[in-house]
Image (cartoon, helix red, strand yellow):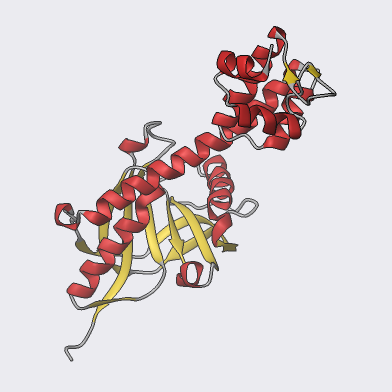
Amino acid sequence: MSIGEFSRLTHLSVRTLRRYHDGGLLEPATVDPATGYRYYSADQIPTAQVIHRLRQLDVPLPDVERILRSPDPGTRAALVADHLQRLESELDRTRAAVVSLRRLLRPEEATLDVQLRAVPPTTVAAVEADVDHDDVIAWYAGAMAELDAVVEEPTGVPGGLYDNALFEDGHGHVLVYRPTADPPRSGRVQPVTLPAVELAVTIHAGDHDDIDVTYGELGTWVVANALAVAGPVRESYLVGPRDAPDPSAWRTEIGWPVFRMAPR
């Protein structure tokens, strides 16, 4: 059949079919040497439709070619699955950005509840290290797994201290902990006594994708109340992935160590 007929059957434009031919993705069954006209066979229709679907998913042309050329169905499925996973990750980031933007563009709807709290010295089992900002999530998961393995009788919810340099310079000191009356020494887990501190605290609800918005709202409250931040930020994980699989149920308490500034 002619390229025009093939175009109508596959809903691919003639221009697109020519591009696929030039790129080696879908070569015509025959090409007239005298006229250069392209002719396709009916059994090429499924291949054309597969290419069309892959391109709709933004699969790069080299990956499309690898999928089509691979004789192993398992390999083809794995290549498609990898790309779908990337798309899902991008979709999650897009959704998180939309949620954050909606909060930022509707400041009148913000209902931040902030309290000042004096926290006494607290004995904890802790793991600490200097960490790059981009590696915090992976490092946290490993450190908390170690704590869970050796702390048999926690006396409170897990938490973390995050040095200012982590946010300002992209690299800083991180300490994650589990409160316990008798902190063990095992591997990276060591006893630590957190100093007494006064905190401005609020609760972030949900996933951590937009936790920076809550940080900003808390910072605005701190400035408005003539307070200054003094020391590493504290987070307490009241409800997290270990407690509830649904991110909407997660609750993270953010605590900024503060002191009252003298009037100007």
Residue at image coords 20%, 78%: 226
Where does the image place residue 27, in percent across and percent down from the top left? 76, 23
The N terminus sits in image quarter = top right
Q: Nearer the viewer, residue 228 or 169?
A: 169
Can you tell which quarter of the image residue 133 is in?
Answer: bottom right
- Quarter of the image that includes the C terminus: bottom left
Position above or below: 255 against 95 = below
* Quadrant housing residue 94: top left
Q: Is residue 258 left or right of residue 242?
A: left
**Quarter of image, res 241:** top left
128 sits to left or right of 1: left
Which of the pair 233/186 is nearer the observer?
233
Place of residue 246 in the rendered image (x, y in percent of width and height, measured from the top left): 37, 32
> Residue farthest to the top?
42
136, above or below 10, in the image = below
Rendering coords of residue 55 (x, y %) = 59, 31
Residue furthest right as drawn: 33
Q: Nearer the viewer, residue 187 or 80?
A: 80
Asked whether the viewer can see residue 109, the reply is: yes
Q: Compared to 23, does 171 lie above or below?
A: below
User: What is the count of numbered marks?
Assistant: 0
- 147 or 112, nearer to the observer: 112
Outermost residue, bottom side: 264
Q: Is residue 100 left or right of residue 41?
A: left
Q: Position of residue 54 (x, y in %)?
A: 61, 27
Residue 153 visible within the image: no
